[in-house]
Amino acid sequence: MKKTVLTGIRPTGNLHIGHYFGASRSWVEVQDHYDCYFEIADVQALTDNFDNPEKVKKNVYELTIDLLSIGIDPNKATIFLQSAIPEIAELTVYYSNLVTMARLYRNPTVKTEIAQKKRLFGNEGESVTYGFVGYPVSQAADITAFGGEIIPVGEDQLPLIEQCREIVRKFNSIYGEVLIEPQALLGKYPRIKGLDGNDKMGKSLGNAIYLCDSPAIIHDKVMSAITDPNKIRKDDPANPDICMVYYYHKLFSGDEVDTVCAECKNGTRGCVACKKQLIDNICKYLEPIREKREYYLNHMDEVQKILEEGSKKAREKAQMTLKNVKKAMKIDFFNE
Ligand code: SF4
């Protein structure tokens, strides 16, 4: 029996290369070895976009197309919508009795995000909703509903998995061994920096290259990337380790990287040519993804069917979990 892997992704926009090298590339490999569930967490996206449902809906389709384009295969893995599984909401209610508000506020991931919101919107009480503070509980429901045993995450997500494990242990200690305690699977790849050298790549930071970017957009973005500021003339020797162009060469340029590094250091390489070489390599790398995107954009009926069938399959699993949970909690009065 293959182990179950659950990956939840918030539909907050298109996937960028930070997502790709940081996590989603490994999902493609994982689907060959595990029973994979990819949850498009649209309900969770509404926790901070509740006033913009159109945006969330659009992002659901964009994300689904991105997943299919990078190679997630609906014949191997299940792609489904969180909002199509009402059992998750019901499990969230039951689990909410098993975690204190103090514990939620102490969760480092929640704490960081609250601090960010506070910086952006001021007063904590006004900017943070009940739904937002509680999202680790709903995430525990996401994971357990499908019997998620392995959860691929980045380091910043580890506290959420720990919170889920606590909820599972508490549930099982009170009601009996019903839920599976998940294990985090830390991604092999580091967080990818933005074009401006920022440790994080993101839409709001305006420093991301998206998998769907056209060659013209990639050209403009790479041309604006931060290089060694001490290299003024074409033949000045420079330090590639402080240059974002070199940083991306290491991701996209394969065997050419050593030459880029050596020529940069000895001043036989100009930044414009170096950037053009990177642009070519990024475009070549992303070409097959862009082609698949094009296909799915022209076959939206297929995308809709994949989501529908995936959600149906996922729901059957969640219904089984909920049944077991209610039985353990002695609230299975009508044997539904
Ligand atoms: Fe960066 Fe290339 Fe210029 Fe060196 S030559 S500073 S690696 S862009």
Image (cartoon, rainbow, N blue to C red):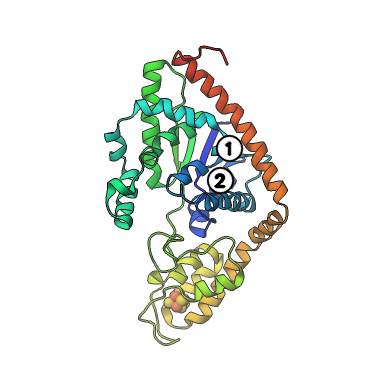
Q: Which mark is residue 151?
A: none
Instruction: Tell me if I can see residue 101 in this picture.
Output: yes
What residue is pinned by disc 2? 27
Question: At 50% across and 81% down in the image, what residue appears?
Answer: 272
Position above or below: 277 against 209: below
Question: In the rendered image, which quarter contains the N terminus?
Answer: top right
Residue 203 x %, y %:
46, 61
Position above or below: 48 against 210: above
Verify CB contact (< 8 Å) between mark 1 and mark 2.
yes
What residue is pinned by disc 1? 36
Question: At 44% across and 36% down in the image, what residue appears?
Answer: 139
Instruction: Tell me if I can see residue 34 in this picture.
Output: no
Indicate left or right for 294 with 236 as reference: right
Indicate left or right for 74 with 134 as reference: right
Q: CA distance from mark 1 to mark 2?
A: 9 Å
Residue 216 x %, y %:
59, 73
Which of the pair 306/263 is nearer the observer? Answer: 306
Which of the pair 225/81 is nearer the observer? Answer: 81
Q: Amino acid at mark 2?
A: Trp
Q: Indicate which disc, 1 or 2, sits on the residue closer to the N terminus.
A: 2
Residue 140 x %, y %:
43, 33
* Mark 2 element type: helix
Q: Quadrant of ligand 1?
A: bottom left
Indicate left or right for 75 with 203 as reference: right
Q: Quadrant of residue 310?
A: top right
